[in-house]
Image (tube, helix red, strand yellow):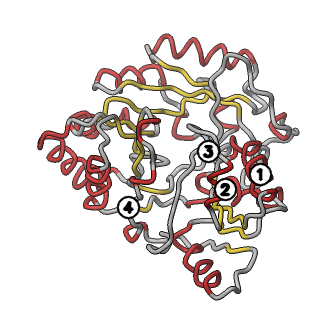
Amino acid sequence: MLPEDWAKRLVDVNVRKLRASDLDWADLVFVSGMIAQQDSAHELIARCRAAGKKIVAGGPLFTLGHEQFPDVDHFVLNEAEVTLPEFLRDFERHTARRMYASLDLPDIRQTPPPLWELADMRRYATMSVQFSRGCPFDCEFCNITAMFGHRPRLKSTAQVIAQLEGLRRAGWRGSVFFVDDNFIGNKHVLKEELLPALIRWQQSGRGTPLFTEASINLADDEELMRLMVEAGFNQVFVGIETPEEAGLAECNKRQNQKRNLVADVQRIQRAGLEVRGDSSSGSTVTRPRSLRASSSSSRKAGSSRQWSACCRPSPAQSFTSGSPNPSPIEATPPRPRRWKHRSR
């Protein structure tokens, strides 16, 4: 999405350190990240400022909390398909503003493929592609709908296959993560278009393991699960959060309510999809008793991997909107020791 004549370098500080030579090379530094990377973002911005570099920031962390970063020169917020072109035009004219933001939701069928050649693939266990953006549900702890809307927007099947082929041309032969907010947000297009195309693609000798995220109602659709397995999916991340109805009601996890979650997980796993379950802590109802119940349910369901997430609040989230009493989530909770950590 940047001009073709710009020289580009990708530094992913998850897998390697930012070197002084990287900053010496750069005229302009783009920084992006998620809420869990807030501390690292502050450190990186301070280094860039000390090196005298212009800083452009975007992505979820800055869209939801740009006021916390006074040293950033330009913010390109919300979805880059909308705001980045305007910034680039102004930047070329030397008239760039500090803030670029828009609530418009772009047609991601126009989104170009990633520049895979910028990534050092030897440093990664998996690579990522995207089919859709947005989620039909409205879980109170999740900022996805605040950023991307309730109606899933889709890339074309041809775009998705092109992304996968681009990875192979770049030398990637490992697993691929479909990073959709909810992969099954539009079941009709999945079953009629994307999954049949992925099955044909895999049958042409690709053999690429796939995994993704989906809501628990995946368990209700045997045909969809069968097609996903045929298309190469072998794992799915599912937000269980808590088996207690009170907790599900408070966080508006309506798709999980009035269900036998243990039976649902078992049904998904019998179909051939390993379930990575997720439980959340931080709301008024996720007390130690609830967390123990989540762990017990995970064992009963046979879920091989259980993640426990500490929710961290952001300005776009309304954790306490339905609660009569202030919730402990209003203060960022500490990360429990020995827990894997995920922050949306």
Q: Is residue 158 left or right of residue 99?
A: left
Mark found first going from the N terminus, 2 or 3:
2
Mark found first going from the N terminus, 4 or 1:
1
Figure check: 281 above or below 107 = above
Tag 4 near tag 2, CB within 8 Å: no
**Spatial distance from mark 1 to mark 3, Cα to Cα?**
36 Å
**Spatial distance from mark 4 to mark 2, Cα to Cα?**
26 Å
Q: In this view, does 37 lie to the left or right of 131?
A: right
Q: In this view, does 125 lie to the left or right of 98?
A: left
Q: Residue 47 carries which label?
A: 1
Task: Read off the residue under disc 3.
Answer: 139
Residue type of the residue flagged with mark 4: Pro
Task: Read off the residue under disc 2.
Answer: 23
Closer mark to the observer between disc 1 and disc 3: 1
Provide the secondary structure element on which disc 1 rests: helix
Closer mark to the observer between disc 2 and disc 1: 2
Tag 4 near tag 1, CB within 8 Å: no
